[in-house]
Image: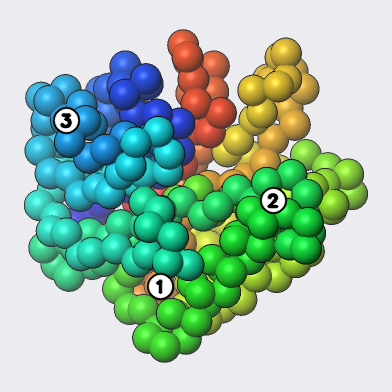
């Protein structure tokens, strides 16, 4: 069985319900993982999703902030969540498929503007979150698992529009890249997107601040699809739906896809 998974920071699922429905109609992934839903779970507009066949959902939410949801056409069961840094934030949820495959949906903190934990508590939170993620993978190395989400870090030089100019900008600083790499290594995770598309600039986020995001093209690859080696060997079809950044009332992130043979 081939399963296509899509991850997308939607920046409010209620505000952007129309483009979520457009994505489901046009692309029809088997599973859609959303971040920054900014909604209590009982306020997520599930009726429209169910009408398109997405009758299964596992989610965690809070009013106006954070929030993660996994929508699926295939049966899934709730596999819990991790309360990283004991803050009570809705930043992680997991779902288990019928064959036992575990899907993690993560929204890692953005980290604020100043890459210095001594003056910016948000940056310290981000680093602590990544450290805890690393430690959990060290305690129990995952198997038959997929991890997706807005990880809020563009790790490679070709994951940003200008490596040199962004070295001191949150999301591409060496300390963030190191922390993310440590978490990835601890879990043995394979970056599926870069396994499929090993060369060239790749972006999944463009700032709202740009008057013409497309022409300026100052993007970053903040959204990721990882898999354990047992599943990464059967992965393919990775792509980033750049066109979604130009949809009506868009998110500043776009959907990222990958397919897996399960």
Where is mark 1, residue-wise? 228
Measured as percent of width and height from the top left, residue 257 is found at 41, 44
Image coordinates of residue 261 in percent, x first then y, are 28, 60
Q: Return the disc, 1 or 2, that comes first in the chain's sequence.
A: 2
Tell me where residue 71 sits by quadrant.
Answer: top left
Query: Up-down: is 17 above or below 202?
Result: above
Q: Earlier in the sequence, mark 1 or mark 3?
A: 3
Gap between marks 1 and 3 measured at Cα: 30 Å
Residue name at image x 40 percent, y 33 percent: 64
Q: Mark 2 points at which residue?
A: 171
Q: Could you tell me if residue 235 is visible in this image? A: no
Can the viewer see residue 40 in this picture? yes
Residue 12 is situated, as x and y percent measured from the top left of the image, at: 40, 29
Q: Distance between the residues labelled 3 and 2?
A: 32 Å
The residue depicted at 78 percent of the width and 56 percent of the height is 119
Of callouts 3 and 2, the N-terminal one: 3
Q: Nearer the viewer, mark 1 or mark 3?
A: 3
In-image side of 256 versus 60 (left or right): right
- In this view, 214 is above or below 137: above
Left or right? Give the position of 22 relative to 208: left
* For the residues bearing labels 3 and 2, Cβ distance under 8 angstroms: no
Which of the labelled discs sits on residue 46, or is there none? 3
As helix, strand or loop, the secondary structure at mark 2 comes to loop
Tag 3 secondary structure: helix
Q: Which residue is drawn at 31% across and 16% down?
A: 18
Of all residues, the one furthest to the bottom in this rendering is: 139
Q: Nearer the viewer, residue 115 or 22?
A: 115
Whole-angstrom CA distance, mark 1 to mark 2, is 24 Å
Task: Report crowding for label 3: few under 14, some 14 to 19, many 20 or more residues within 10 A (C-alpha).
Answer: some
């Amino acid at each position: 069985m081939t399963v296509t998974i899509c991850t997308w920071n939607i920046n409010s699922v209620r505000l952007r319900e129309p483009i979520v429905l457009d994505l489901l109609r046009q692309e029809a992934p088997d599973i859609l993982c959303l971040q920054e839903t900014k909604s209590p779970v009982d306020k997520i507009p599930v009726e429209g999703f169910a009408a398109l066949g997405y009758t299964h959902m596992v989610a965690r939410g809070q009013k106006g902030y954070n929030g993660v949801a996994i929508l699926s056409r295939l049966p899934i069961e709730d596999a819990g969540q991790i309360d990283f840094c004991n803050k009570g934030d809705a930043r992680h949820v997991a779902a288990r498929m019928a064959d036992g495959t575990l899907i993690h949906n993560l929204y890692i903190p953005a980290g604020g503007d100043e890459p210095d934990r001594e003056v910016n508590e948000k940056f310290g939170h981000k680093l602590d979150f990544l450290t805890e993620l690393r430690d959990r993978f060290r305690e129990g190395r995952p198997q038959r698992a997929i991890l997706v989400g807005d990880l809020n870090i563009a790790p490679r030089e070709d994951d940003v529009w200008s490596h040199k100019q962004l070295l001191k900008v949150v999301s591409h600083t060496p300390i963030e890249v190191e922390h993310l790499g440590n978490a990835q290594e601890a879990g043995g995770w394979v970056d599926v997107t870069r396994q499929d598309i090993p060369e060239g600039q790749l972006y999944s986020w463009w700032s709202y601040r740009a008057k013409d995001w497309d022409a300026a093209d100052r993007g970053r690859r903040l959204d990721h699809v990882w898999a354990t080696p047992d599943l990464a060997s059967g992965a393919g079809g990775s792509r980033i739906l750049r066109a979604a950044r130009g949809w009506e009332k868009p998110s500043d992130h776009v959907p990222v896809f990958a397919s897996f043979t399960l």
